[in-house]
Amino acid sequence: MENNEVEQVENRKKYRIGWFAIVFWVGVAVIFDLLTLIPIVGAVCGTLYFAAFAVYLWKTGHGWVNWKVVVPEALAVVAEWIPAIQALPAIVAGAVIIIAISRVEDKTGISIPLPGKKPGTTPPRIQKAPLNQGGVRAPR
């Protein structure tokens, strides 16, 4: 039985964002979203929240400029700077989208590529013929 338990622990998925972090960041997002009901405070709160969240995501291995993180963050920050849209829960929505994408990637092991880019492909390098082939110099 002990062997089976050890195998289960080893086979357990390692998530970059744990449950405690999810509860913490979504809870802080809810508080900051409630603060956005105050007109000027909202723009500052959204920007500060996503700056801190970006640093946390960078430390957990999501990368500094990852399009799956930057796009929801940028949309939420822009939404917080627009007065009429500021009342919507953009901070919570952005945080939940980022966490969901991270969990899906960690669970499946599949990274969602940038639209229009084929993962793992690079253009072929141009191969020039060597100048001196078989002891015979190429003509000019």
Image (cartoon, rainbow, N blue to C red):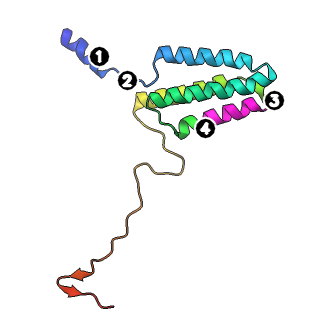
Q: Is residue 100 visible?
A: no
For marks 2 and 3, give the one nearer the viewer.
3
Q: Residue 38: x, y in percent?
A: 79, 19
- The amino acid on which the numbered mark 2 sits, given as a three-letter code, is Lys
Q: Which residue is mark 4?
A: 71
The residue under label 1 is: 9
Magenta stretch in the rendered image: 72-83
Q: CA distance from mark 1 to mark 4?
A: 35 Å
Locate residue 133, reporting x and y percent: 21, 81
Give 17 or 103, whichever is nearer the viewer: 17
For marks 1 and 4, give the one nearer the viewer. Answer: 4
Q: Is residue 96 above or below residue 121?
A: above
Q: Earlier in the sequence, mark 1 or mark 4?
A: 1
Disc nearer the start of the sequence (2/3): 2
SS under mark 2:
loop
Quarter occupied by the C terminus: bottom left
Amino acid type, mark 4: Val
Is 70 located above or below residue 55 in the figure?
below
Q: Secondary structure at mark 4?
A: helix
Q: CB atoms at circles 4 and 3 under 8 Å apart?
A: no
Describe residue 128's horizontal placement relative to residue 79 as left or right: left
Label 3 is placed on what type of residue?
Pro
CA gap, disc 2 and disc 3: 40 Å
